[in-house]
Image (cartoon, rainbow, N blue to C red):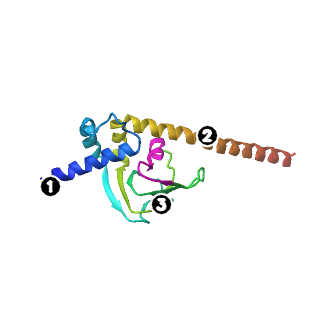
Amino acid sequence: MKRLIEITQRTRVVYSALRSAGLYTADDTEERTREQCAQIASKVRVISVPPGHVFASGSKANREFIMSYQGTFKRTRSDATASPQMLGPGGSAGGVAMLRGDGLREEVVADSACLVLVASDTDFFGLLELLPALSAQLMLKAFQRQAPLSALLESDQRSVEHSVRNSTRAHR
């Protein structure tokens, strides 16, 4: 009985978190989504952490998908393409990096006491299969991040061209 209560509670937290993230609409009632939420709940851990808890340090690639249910956390990307972001209920971190597989490093730290859903990198892709809306949301974010990346690449290309021109002049 205790196990059933625990599963039911986790399923309800998953449902509420997905509603907060805009992944479920008003038509997606808890009753209509119960089976899907139970499947999702089997792929995530629901954990409570104190302020200051480090989900991911900027020294290595983030290997977890983190979605806030309650509380806020701060995400800072190590590539400096964006300013630090405060993410509240429904906010997530780690998904775009795992989707792109580019090893993006980011620091994710709880700003307040948080209740979060966490999926490992192995469970993350199963989560995307269960939630096409999450997959679409993350793909859009990945696409939006391409613009700053392309600007950096163009800058690097101009820098290389400048170095080649200077090198050619020096050898004349």
Which sits in the foreground, 160 or 149?
149
The residue identified by callout 1 is 2
Camera-side mark, 1 or 2: 1
Label 2 sits on a secondary structure element that is helix
Q: Residue furthest front?
A: 26
Residues 81 and 163: in front is: 81
Where is residue 66 shown, x and y percent of the image? Answer: 40, 51
Q: Amino acid at mark 2?
A: Ala
What's the mark number on residue 57? Answer: 3
Instruction: State yes or no: residue 133 in magenta.
Output: no
Q: Which residue corresponds to mark 2? A: 147
- Expressed as whole percent of the image width and height from the top left, the position of residue 57 reads 47, 60
- Whether residue 123 sits left or right of residue 112 in the image: it is left
Query: Would you call the spot at circle 3 few (<14 residues within 10 Å), some (14-19), or many (20 or more)?
Result: some
CB atoms of marks 3 and 2 within 8 Å: no
**Amino acid bearing label 3:** Ser
Give the vertical position of 109 relative to 117 (above or below). Answer: below
Q: Quadrant of the C terminus?
A: top right
